[in-house]
Image: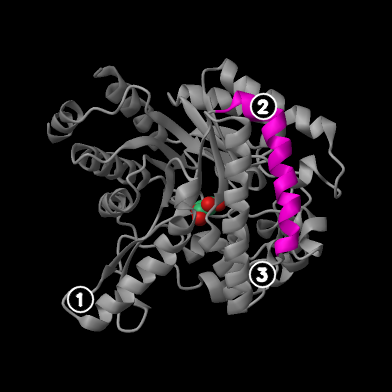
Amino acid sequence: MQEDAQDASVEFPKDFLWGASTSAHQVEGGNHNQWTVWELAHAAEKAKTAQQRYGHLANWEEIKAEVTNPSNYVSGRGTDHYHRYKDDFELLQKLNFNSFRFGIEWSRIEPEEGQWDEKALEHYRQYIEKLKEMDIEPVLNIWHWTVPVWFARRGGFKKKANLKYFDRLVSKISDQYGHLLRYVIVLNEPNVYISFSYLTGAWPPQEKNFLTAARVYYNLARAHKRAYKKLKKDHPAIQIGIAAQLANIQAKRPHNLIDEFSTQLMRDFWNWWFLHHINRHQDFVGLNYYFTDYYTGLFKRENPKTPLNDLGWYMEPEGLYPLMLRAWAHYKKPIIISENGVADSKDQYRQWWMEETIIAMQRAMSEGVDIRGYFHWSLLDNFEWADGWWPRFGLVDIDRKNAMKRTIRPSAKWFAAKIEKLSASK
Ligand code: BGC
């Protein structure tokens, strides 16, 4: 009853983008980039040390065999999406999606510096054309953390001089595909990237240096602005943004000065620094939402103990609401939820998560927030970076032991029916 009342009272815009999100490296398979090199070098050690990282999780017994096996940490054949993309697009249709966020793998189209692989370029052209033919809006993501080995050897985004290579990649994408696109996301989560790759040292190139991290951050902001200018010049109608990982950061004790201080600083650093920097160069705010975090004392995160997803992340889907309000208050630009989802192998939380999320969006829309799209992370179970294959984020289950068979999860069926209902009320 209550749900129906919500459906009737707040309508999603007719052209609202309902979709799922993926990234090239996490699904394609057969890649050769700085991540694959790193995966192969570290898989054995990661398998050996798995208990240190995951032993505390409630599902340890269930994941033990998988996480102590080195193959968990190697992207390898991926989900074979590179070859099965047409079948996967049919899944999008089955799920009533009208849009899809996907990545282009830089190392495929420019495997060696300055040498473009025509076959790979053609592959992505056909890929985008297929989506359009099926009436699915392609949302192209240019950079999602992976880079060609030659670019990493040159120091990657650490060096400002290297931005010319990224400029060239953007020009190529603009020339080849710009006329086919209405939405481009240039960068995915620069804050997460600098944190794991240059601060904690958990991801390649495993550096731990604040100044280097800051330099990479600035260079990514520069890279984005340059990409924005180039794409806008070539194709003024394309809507351009980034996918920013924003957390709903709250003070554990709102009356406490230290908790408030940590909260404000974390918000400014984690959520807003990059977006403020590029704000004149974004047409929409792309928002990836996974986390609500409560801060106490000096930067101590203290979240409720339940409910947790498979990775042990605290889940508060409705935290998207205050976050959208803040993003709207800051930028007054349309918001696209570019990622949102849960690692949930038993599919016990996903429906609840999406239900709460839809209500959070309706609530924000009723207060005037301009939301244009929602992309669930992810379409398929995929390669979860340093954690490997075991976390299951997919609306569609992939059976990697059984010819990578795709099976739509019950929550995804629920979501498909919900989209139909929300769209039918027009
Ligand atoms: C990233 C994805 C990742 C997801 C779940 C986001 O931070 O963009 O690549 O798989 O979160 O961790």
Q: Nearer the viewer, residue 285 or 26?
A: 285
SS at circle 1: loop
- The span from disc 3 to disc 1 (Cα, nearest Å) is 37 Å
- Discs 3/2, front: 2
Question: Tag 1 or tag 2, which sits nearer the N-term?
Answer: 2
- The span from disc 2 to disc 1 (Cα, nearest Å) is 50 Å
Q: Amino acid at mark 1?
A: Arg
Say left or right for 402 vs 108: left
Image quadrant holding the N terminus, namely: top left
Q: Nearer the viewer, residue 178 or 232?
A: 232
Residue under pointer 1: 253
The x and y percentages for residue 274 are 48, 60
- Discs 3/1, front: 1
Residue 127 numbered mark, or none: 2
Q: Main secondary structure of the magenta part?
A: helix
Q: Amino acid at mark 2?
A: Tyr
Q: Amino acid at mark 3?
A: Lys
SS at circle 3: helix
The residue at the point 57 percent across, 71 percent down is 214
- The span from disc 3 to disc 2 (Cα, nearest Å) is 35 Å
Q: Which residues are magenta?
A: 160-181
Residue 202 in sight in this render: no
Question: Tag 2 or tag 3, which sits nearer the N-term?
Answer: 3
Q: Is residue 95 above or below residue 197?
A: above
SS at circle 2: helix
Q: Residue 173 in magenta?
A: yes
| Residue 367 location, quadrant | top left
The x and y percentages for residue 363 are 20, 41
Residue under pointer 3: 46
